[in-house]
Image (cartoon, rainbow, N blue to C red):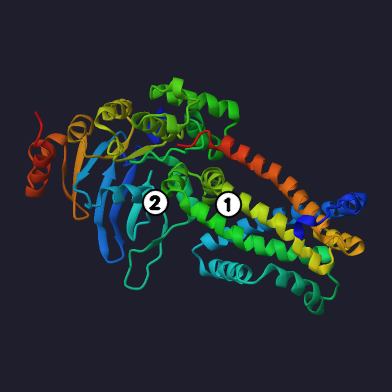
C-alpha cells in the first residue's frame, strides 16, 4: 500500500511563504539560544572549574537541574508557570529561548569545564610565571587552546540547539515545525509537509557543520 | 645590569652589597609530607647557584617557592630587600604569611622561570611566545614587542625560527625559545627548573651553551640540574639538598670535588660513575 502513495508536494510549495516565516522564526530563536546558551555556559563552566564552594556549588546545582529535566517541560513551565510568579506575561519566544538557552548552558558548561581542565597545568603556570594575572592566563593561553579542543563538542551543541528550536512549537511560537503543523492540518498532507521540513533542516545545518570543519582545520594548523 | 640597578643593590651606609634574594626559614609541606624544612639562603647579584639533590629532595619545590608557583607554608622571602607577603600568625603556626595575588604577580614579573617541560604556548609561533609577556604583561605595542622578541630569539640563536610553531621545533629549540621568553621580561633573577632533563642527550649541549652565555653576562640565576659537570663549570656556588634541607653548600670545588658529607659524596660519585 505504501508504495502506491501518490506524493504531491504542490500544496506545500504553494504555501512556501508560510514555511518561510517559520524558517525566519527558527533562525531567530537559534541565534538567540546559541549566543545565550554557549555564552552563559562559559560563565557556568568557569563556576564549575572554581575552587570556592560558594561559586562551585550553585554552578553545579544549575548544571544538574537543567541537564536532568526535559527541555520541553522547561519551556512549558516558563510559559505557563513563570507568569504566575512574575508580574508580567511571557511571550512564546521568551519561554522557548529561556528553556533552550538554560538547557544548552548546562550542557556546554560541562564542555567548557572539561576543555579547560584538559589543558596541561604547565600552560597556566608558564603564563603566571611571566607575570600574567589569572584572568590574562585564562584568556590568552588556556582558553584559546581549550576552545580548539572543544570545537567538535560545541558544534554538536549548536546542531542540537538548532533542532531543539522545534520544541518551541509546543507554545505556538512561529517556527518551522509550528508552520508545518499548520500547513499539514490545512492541506491534510503531513507526509509531504514534514518531509520538506526535514529537508529544510538538513539544508540549513549541513553548511553550518561544514563551516565548523573548515574552522577546525584552520585552528588545527599549529597543533602538535 | 645597569649602574643604577647595581648601585641600588648596595647598602649606601655600609657599602656592603645586599642580597637580591634573602630566604629565611622557608618551609613547605604537602599534607603531612614536609618537602622543605627551614631553608636559609642569600642570593647575591650575579650569583649562579646550582641546586643538586636526589629526586624528592625538594630542589624543584624550593625553586617554585621563589616565584610562588607554590606558596611557602612558613618563612620569609625578600626580593631586593622587600619581604614578600605579610605575617599572619595562625594557631600553632606563628610563621604563617599571607600573600596578595597582585603582589605575587608583580614578583613574578621580576623573577623569570624556565621549566623542565618548556611549557611553550603551542597556539603561538616562537616569536608569538616571546612577544606574549611583552604585550600582555608589559603592555608594549606590537612593533616594539616584535622587535624585542626577535632580538631575544636571535640571542638564543633562533632568529630564523620566529615563524615556526612549537610543534615544529626540536626539544632543544623549544627550551631555547622558552629561555628567550623569560629573558624578554628583563628578569632580575632567573630560575631554571631542570632545563635539560626532558631533552634527548644530543640536544642538551645547545641549551647549556645558552645558559652558560647568560651566566657569563653576570645574570643572577638559580639552576636545579642533574648536569654535575655543567654545575661545576658554570656555578659559583653549589647547594646539595637532602630531605628538604641544605645538606652541604660551598664552591663547586668544595661540594663536588671534596664533599665533606657522606650523602653528598655518594650522590656525586653516583653521578660520576660512568664518566670517562
Q: Which mark is residue B147?
A: none
**Depth check: B276 or A137 in front?**
B276
Residue sitting at x 43%, y 29%? B168
SS type, badge 1? helix
Q: Which chain does the residue under circle 1 lie in?
A: A
Whole-angstrom CA distance, mark 1 to mark 2, is 35 Å
Judge whether residue B139 can be spotted in this image.
no
Reading the image, the residue beneath label 2 is B68
- Name the residue furthest bottom: A84
Q: Tell me the quarter of the picture where residue A71 sits.
A: bottom right
Residue B45 location, quadrant: top left
Residue A131 location (% of width, % of height): 48, 44
On the image, numbered disc 1 is attached to which residue?
A: A153
Is B231 placed above or below B100 here?
Answer: above
Query: In the rendered structure, the residue with mark 2 lies on which chain?
Result: B
Other residues around mark 1 within 10 Å, as few (<14) / some (14–19) / many (≥20): some
- Quadrant assignment for the C terminus of chain B: top left
Disc 2 secondary structure class:
loop
Between residue B221 and residue A26, name the one nearer to us: A26
Q: Position of residue A33 (x, y in %)?
A: 73, 57
Amino acid at each position: 500500500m505504501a508504495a502506491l502513495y501518490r506524493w504531491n508536494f504542490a500544496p506545500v510549495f504553494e504555501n512556501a511563504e508560510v514555511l518561510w516565516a517559520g524558517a525566519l522564526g527558527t533562525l531567530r530563536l537559534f541565534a538567540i539560544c546559541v549566543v545565550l546558551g554557549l555564552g552563559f555556559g562559559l560563565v557556568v563552566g568557569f563556576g564549575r572549574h572554581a575552587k570556592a564552594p560558594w561559586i562551585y556549588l550553585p554552578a553545579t546545582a544549575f548544571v544538574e537541574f537543567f541537564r536532568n529535566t526535559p527541555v520541553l517541560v522547561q519551556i512549558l513551565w516558563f510559559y505557563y508557570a513563570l507568569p504566575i510568579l512574575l508580574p508580567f506575561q511571557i511571550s512564546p519566544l521568551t519561554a522557548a529561548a529561556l528553556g533552550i538557552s538554560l538547557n544548552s548552558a548546562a550542557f556546554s558548561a560541562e564542555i567548557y569545564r572539561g576543555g579547560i581542565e584538559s589543558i596541561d597545568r604547565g600552560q597556566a603556570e608558564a603564563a603566571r610565571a611571566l607575570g600574567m594575572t589569572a584572568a590574562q592566563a585564562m584568556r590568552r593561553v588556556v582558553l584559546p587552546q581549550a576552545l580548539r579542543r572543544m570545537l567538535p563538542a560545541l558544534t554538536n551543541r549548536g546542531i542540537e540547539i538548532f533542532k531543539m528550536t522545534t520544541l518551541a512549537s509546543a507554545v505556538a511560537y512561529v517556527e518551522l515545525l509550528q508552520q508545518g503543523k499548520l500547513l499539514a492540518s490545512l492541506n491534510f498532507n503531513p507526509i509531504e509537509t514534514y518531509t520538506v521540513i526535514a529537508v529544510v533542516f538538513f539544508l540549513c545545518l549541513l553548511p553550518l557543520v561544514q563551516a565548523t570543519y573548515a574552522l577546525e582545520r584552520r585552528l588545527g594548523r599549529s597543533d602538535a | 645590569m645597569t649602574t643604577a640597578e647595581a648601585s641600588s643593590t648596595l647598602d649606601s651606609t655600609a657599602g656592603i652589597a645586599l642580597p637580591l634574594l634573602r630566604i629565611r626559614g622557608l618551609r613547605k609541606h604537602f599534607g603531612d609530607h614536609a618537602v622543605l624544612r627551614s631553608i636559609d639562603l642569600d642570593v647575591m647579584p650575579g650569583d649562579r647557584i646550582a641546586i643538586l639533590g636526589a629526586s624528592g629532595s625538594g630542589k624543584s619545590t624550593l625553586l617554585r617557592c621563589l616565584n610562588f608557583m607554590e606558596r611557602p607554608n612558613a618563612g620569609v622571602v625578600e626580593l631586593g630587600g622587600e619581604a614578600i607577603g605579610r605575617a599572619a600568625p595562625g594557631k600553632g603556626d606563628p610563621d604563617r604569611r599571607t600573600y596578595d595575588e597582585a603582589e605575587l604577580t608583580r614578583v613574578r614579573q621580576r623573577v623569570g622561570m624556565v621549566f623542565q617541560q618548556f611549557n611553550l604556548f603551542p597556539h603561538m609561533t616562537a616569536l608569538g611566545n616571546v612577544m606574549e609577556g611583552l604585550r600582555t604583561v608589559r603592555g608594549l605595542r606590537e612593533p616594539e614587542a616584535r622587535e624585542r622578541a626577535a632580538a631575544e630569539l636571535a640571542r638564543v640563536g633562533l632568529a630564523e625560527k620566529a615563524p615556526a610553531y612549537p610543534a615544529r621545533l626540536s626539544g632543544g629549540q623549544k627550551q631555547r625559545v622558552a629561555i628567550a621568553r623569560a629573558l624578554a621580561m628583563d628578569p632580575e633573577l632567573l630560575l631554571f627548573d631542570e632545563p635539560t632533563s626532558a631533552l634527548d642527550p644530543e640536544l642538551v649541549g645547545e641549551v647549556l651553551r645558552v645558559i652558560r652565555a647568560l651566566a657569563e653576562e653576570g645574570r643572577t640565576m638559580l639552576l636545579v640540574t642533574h648536569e654535575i659537570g655543567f654545575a661545576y663549570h658554570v656555578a659559583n656556588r653549589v647547594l646539595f639538598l637532602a630531605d628538604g634541607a641544605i645538606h652541604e653548600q660551598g664552591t663547586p670545588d668544595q661540594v663536588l670535588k671534596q664533599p665533606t658529607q657522606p650523602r653528598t659524596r655518594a650522590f656525586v660519585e653516583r653521578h660520576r660513575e660512568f664518566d670517562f
